[in-house]
Image (spheres, rainbow, N blue to C red):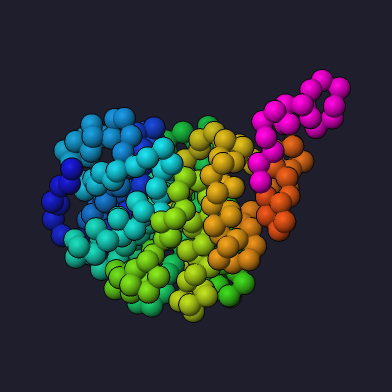
Amino acid sequence: MTSDPAPSSVAVVTVCTPARAGHLWSQRRALAAHLPDARHVVVLPERPGSAGLATELVADGADPLEVPAGEDLPVARCRNTGGDRAVEAGADLVVFLDVDCMPGPDLGSRYAELPSDAVGVGPVTYLSESAGAPDPADLAGLTDPHAARPFPEHGVRRLEADEFGMFWSLSFALHTDLWTRLRTDFGGFDEQYTGYGAEDTDFGRRLLYRRVPVVLVAGAHAYHRWHPVSSPPVEHLADLLRNGAHYAERWGEWPAPGWFEEFERRGLVRRRGDGWEAVPADRHAEDHRPGIEG
């Protein structure tokens, strides 16, 4: 189901499942406050409840797109579909925003200043559980960007070729002419990645490999609402093994080495050549029987 909102120079693309609907509505409240004229393209991979959520979004003025999906979420395909929709809608700028992220007051204006040939990445503050769903007017006072990505105080900083790991898909933007060029050049996000992990690291690496400027954008703040996480994400192990192998085939190394080392320590994976494979469940259960350290 799709709607036909009025044309906008900015399109915000969000991938959402019904399980994240509460965070989506928080995001929409912040968009109404800080980017009221943006077209909100919400890509809904097929899940129970997606059709009903699409109907609600149409009534609320959004532009939902339902995408067929199997057991493994096609996140890369959803992002490509959303970016293409932004182009079709005539937007000049497309902002990809994780469903858990609320845009800050200056996110749109800072991204709008991007050079036409650059992909911009904005700082993200991870909110505490106690912050709940903040009023959009209070977001600026909660600013405390994730320390793993040191952003400039003003303007932009261009990433070097070996800094591809600093790209993230939580919040990034580019002009739609550049998105169209990337889709023609290498397809955008690689749709062979399904489920959790590696598709965004691969995308950032391919950008820098092709000398597309990727810049850290000061002041384009987004605020990530709290939700439970596990570290390392054991529940996504099968996805990480599958996607990691695909990534390694292209780049000659596996992503997230620290996670796989921890999986190995827990007896969940083992080395196979230069890569990793799952430890059979019966072997894992045997190695972790009472009296054996693991």
Q: Position of residue 220 (x, y in %)?
A: 43, 60
The C terminus lies in quadrant:
top right
Front one among 96 and 187: 187
Q: Residue at x 51, y 62 (%)?
A: 202
Residue 190 quadrant: bottom left
Work out whether residue 137 can be spotted: no
Image check: 208 left or right of 106? right
Above or below, 108 against 181 in this view is: above
- Span shown in magenta: 277-294
Q: Residue at x 70, y 28 (%)?
A: 282
Front one among 223 and 293: 293
Verify whether residue 278 appears in magenta: yes
Above or below, 149 against 215 in this view is: above
Front one among 177 and 23: 177
Q: Residue at x 38, y 78 (%)?
A: 117
Q: Report the label total.
A: 0
Can you name the residue that lies furthest to the top here?
290
Work out whether residue 235 can be spotted: yes
Q: Residue at x 34, y 58 (%)?
A: 80
Image check: 53 left or right of 210? left
Front one among 44 and 226: 44
Q: Position of residue 211 (x, y in %)?
A: 49, 79
Residue 232 quadrant: top right
Q: Position of residue 224 (x, y in %)?
A: 47, 45
Verify whether residue 161 appears in magenta: no
Q: Position of residue 1 (x, y in %)?
A: 18, 43
